[in-house]
Amino acid sequence: MKKRNVFLILILLLLAIVAGCGETYDKEAFEEVRKYSDAIIPAIDETSYNYDVWRNEPTDENLQLLKKSIEKINQVNKELWTETLENEKEIEKWSIKMTQGQQSWVIEGKELFPALFDTMDHSDFLAVVVLEEIDKNKNNIDTKKIKYAIDDANESASKLRKILYNK
């Protein structure tokens, strides 16, 4: 009888150890990360595209399209960036195994958090720069300043895209 109890305890301990070796992350918080990323990455891409269109054909209509895409970035940052996404200590603990088709990769929180935060920060800066230039300097917009901000936002979004989607 004692051997049986000891054997059962050993099996339960082994199962607890194996279960503890799985993925470590907050699923609800990760969904917030995905929701934010799924919105901000395309918004940055759209802004970059609309900027290129406006630079090639600087009409008021194209400038309004650029402004509209910036407003989308502001909306995403306002509505989807939450305190959960600012929890560096929690996110950096995450390790998430992802699969898509035949591909698999691991998202490490220590890589995810800086990419996520930089994307928010750079997209916010981009929005400020573009709106400031449009509002204050409509006839003499500093395109180098905007291009610098777009390049930073694109680089951050690319890093985030690579980490989350392996693309």
Image: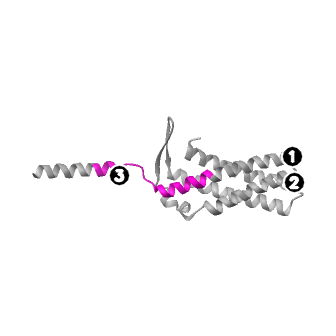
Residue indicated by mark 2: 60
Identified at 64% across, 57% down, the residue is 120
- Using the numbered discs, state the Cα–Cα distance from disc 1 to disc 3 in whole angstroms: 57 Å
- Cα separation, mark 3 vs mark 2, equals 58 Å
Chief secondary structure of the magenta portion: helix
Circle 2 — which element?
helix
Write down the residue under mark 1: 57
- Magenta range is 15-38
- Amino acid bearing label 3: Gly
86 relative position to 148: left or right:
left
- Which colour scheme appears in the figure? one colour
Badge 3 is on which residue? 20
Q: Is residue 140 left or right of residue 145?
A: right
Q: Residue furthest top?
A: 102
Residue pictured at 12% horizontal, 49% vertical: 3
Q: Secondary structure at mark 1?
A: loop
